[in-house]
Image: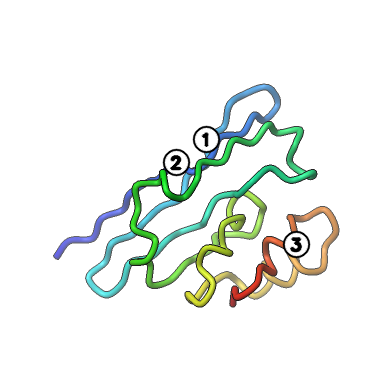
Amino acid sequence: MSITITPVLVADLVVEGEPMPVYVHVIDHPDARVLVDTGMREPHRLTVDLHPRPRPAAEWGVDLTGIDLVVNTHLHFDHCGNNHLFAGTPIHVQRQELDDALTLDDYTIREWVEASGVQ
């Protein structure tokens, strides 16, 4: 069986007047199905200036129930915002990144990092 990597458009932002797509990636591997990053959810008061347009997970075209583990490359809001959809699924991130996200002000949206059921 081969390994496939599928990009999935999950949101759009506007950064400095320029459109910026937000992608996550699904890695289908013989041993596991991995989701790299989870994108962002509904607009938040800290993101309103970026004009976020998240796409509902039902429109991603991905069977989310088949995800075995999640890897967050880092914990900025547009990379971890949908972690809550994977409560009970192992989510991996570097220890220093998690420490920074939980302690540094203005780093990310902390309640998205600490979503209920996320470990």
| Contact flag, marks 1 and 2 (Cβ < 8 Å) | yes
The answer to which image quadrant residue 114 occupies is bottom right
Q: Position of residue 2 (x, y in %)?
A: 17, 61
The residue positioned 61% from the left and 34% from the top of the image is 13
| Contact flag, marks 2 and 3 (Cβ < 8 Å) | no
The outermost residue toward the top is 17
The answer to which image quadrant residue 68 occupies is bottom left
Quadrant containing the N terminus is bottom left
Identify residue type, mark 1.
Answer: Pro
Ranked by sequence position, the earlier of labels 2 and 3 is: 2
The residue positioned 46% from the left and 50% from the top of the image is 57
Q: Position of residue 7 (x, y in %)?
A: 38, 46
Image-based side of 4 in relation to 98, left or right: left
Image-based side of 115 in relation to 68, left or right: right
Callout 2: SS: strand
Q: Is residue 111 above or below residue 119?
A: above
Image-based side of 71 in relation to 63, left or right: right
Q: Characterize the local packing of mark 1: few (<14), some (14-19) or many (20 or more) Cα atoms within 10 angstroms.
A: some
Q: Position of residue 112 (x, y in %)?
A: 68, 61
Tell me the CA gap for discs 2 and 3: 23 Å
Tell me the CA gap for discs 1 and 2: 7 Å
Name the residue that disc number 3 marks: 110
Name the residue that disc number 1 marks: 21
Name the residue that disc number 2 marks: 9
Identify residue type, mark 3.
Answer: Arg
The residue positioned 61% from the left and 59% from the top of the image is 74
Callout 3: SS: helix
Ranked by sequence position, the earlier of labels 1 and 3 is: 1
- Camera-side residue of 68 and 104: 68
